[in-house]
Image (cartoon, rainbow, N blue to C red):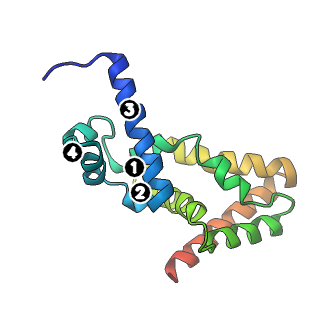
Amino acid sequence: MARITTEERERKKAQYDALILSIFLEEGWDAITYDRLAKDLGIGKSSVQRYYENRMLFATALQGKLMPMALRRLDMTSKEAFIDSWELAINDDQDHVFREIVRMLMTNILHVGTSKATAMAVNRLISVLSTSIGENEAVEAVKASLGLTMFVYMNQ
């Protein structure tokens, strides 16, 4: 097998990451699979696996892109306002992106060997919220929202 240059590898990774983001925004987390990426890219599944060793690593393609989208949907003025805005966003049938962000987050949290990036994302959310309502209230608001999420998914 011919070796590719570092630049070529980075170019391909950026291309693959862009496709992952596009599929995520259009169809959601569950639509991102090795088979789908290989088909859309016109390459073998094993080629995709060289860039993403496991499915949870597809989330690395989305790092830094989703948090701003999620934060726009959330009211940070109080614990209650945050939880209420979370519930509205997760149940919004007109805009599935927030729900898909949370689905990806929950999938990664529940996966054995949660990635550091997932823990960092939750901690970043708490940090952003704590600037408005304090750390204890922020932690409680995020805990309540994640619990609420489980009930939403159970009843879908």
Neighbours of disc 2 within 10 Å: few (<14), some (14-19), many (20+): few
Left of 118 or right of it: where is 39? Answer: left
Q: Which residue is mark 3?
A: 13
The first of marks 3 and 1 along the sequence is 3
Neighbours of disc 3 within 10 Å: few (<14), some (14-19), many (20+): some
Tell me residue 28's x, y (percent): 46, 60
Secondary structure found at label 1: helix
Disc 1, disc 2: CB below 8 Å? yes
Question: In whole angstroms, how far apart are the C-alphas of marks 4 and 3?
Answer: 14 Å
Question: In whole angstroms, how far apart are the C-alphas of marks 1 and 2?
Answer: 8 Å
Question: In whole angstroms, how far apart are the C-alphas of marks 1 and 4?
Answer: 16 Å
> Amino acid under label 2?
His
Question: In whole angstroms, how far apart are the C-alphas of marks 4 and 2?
Answer: 22 Å
> Amino acid under label 1?
Met
Secondary structure found at label 3: helix
Secondary structure found at label 2: loop
> Amino acid under label 3?
Lys
In this rendering, is residue 4 above or below 106? above
Tell me residue 9's x, y (percent): 33, 24
Q: Which residue is mark 1?
A: 56
Q: Which residue is mark 2?
A: 111
The first of marks 1 and 2 along the sequence is 1
Tell me residue 119's x, y (percent): 56, 47
For the point 38% across and 32% down, which residue is it? 13
Secondary structure found at label 4: helix
The first of marks 2 and 3 along the sequence is 3
Tell me residue 142's x, y (percent): 69, 61
